[in-house]
Amino acid sequence: MNNKIKILSLTLSLWAATTAAQSKVNDYLHIPGPIQLNNTSYNLVWTSHPNNNYYKQEYLTAGDNLEKFKSLVTVDFLQGNFQPRDLAGQKVEELKKLKATNPMINYNVYEKNQEYILDFLISQASADGKGIAIIERNVYRYHAVDNNGVKGLLLFAASQRAYGPEVTAFLKKLSVEKSKLVDAVATYKLPEVSIK
């Protein structure tokens, strides 16, 4: 896999909410909001356009915040000739490497109609190394876009987090409702990307 895809995959795989707050939010992708997913409403709260072909937009529920969110929707767009299989595969390779030192990491990959869905669990240990500070479940949907000459890759992602003492309850709930978020992301009507 070439270095360009590796760099873009690393950009896509950064954990959400690691950047400073900004005063103005630009809807670069012109997505009508709020986003409704899993009977929950998400509003656009943060955007970034760090280079000519990469756009990132993050959405939260009312009352949630990027520094310590419980539920987040992300829409990323990479303009260019990118294949869902390549970027999903790159993320899987990254997870395999992380799993060597973090046994909590777990993932499943689903493919249908040349779209890929990656369902994965990651965690961050507590400062003393004796527990889990953050557990995060992500469902990434990779979709190729060819819209009026605009080609690229759309990543539609849903993330859920729990912190410290909430982790055990989060994992129990996940074991019962594992397919619910995957189904919601898989059946979500993806927005048409419009870049101006």
Image (cartoon, rainbow, N blue to C red):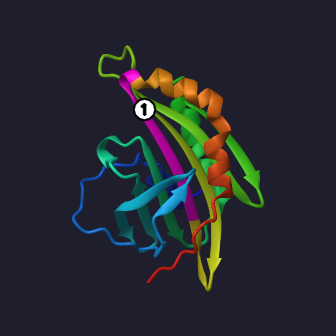
- Camera-side residue of 146 and 23: 23
Left or right of 115, for residue 157: left
Whether 178 is drawn above or below 20: the answer is above
| 159 over 8 or under it: above or below | above
**Residue drawn at point x = 61 percent, y = 66 percent:** 190
Q: Alpha-carbon neighbours of circle 1 within 10 Å: few (<14), some, or many (≥20)? A: many
Spot the residue most to the top: 130
The quadrant the N terminus occupies is bottom right
Compared with 97, 172 (above or below) is: above
Residue 87 visible at all: no
Per the image, the residue denoted by label 1 is 162
Secondary structure state at the residue bearing disc 1? strand
Front in this rendered view, residue 109 or 96: 109
In x, y percent, where is residue 66? 33, 48
Q: Residue at x 63, y 51 (%)?
A: 184
Task: State how many labels appear.
Answer: 1
Majority secondary structure of magenta residues: strand
Residue 18 screen position, x and y as percent: 32, 48
Residue pictured at 21% horizontal, 65% vertical: 23
Q: Residue furthest left?
A: 23
Locate residue 59 relative to residue 173 in the image: left or right.
left
* Residue 101 percent across, percent down from the top left: 49, 24
Q: In this picture, which residue range is highlighted in magenta?
A: 154-165
The answer to whether residue 124 is seen in the rendering is yes
Amino acid at circle 1: Ala
Residue drawn at the location 24% of the way across and 61% of the way down: 22
Give the x, y percent position of residue 47: 36, 64
For residue 157: magenta?
yes
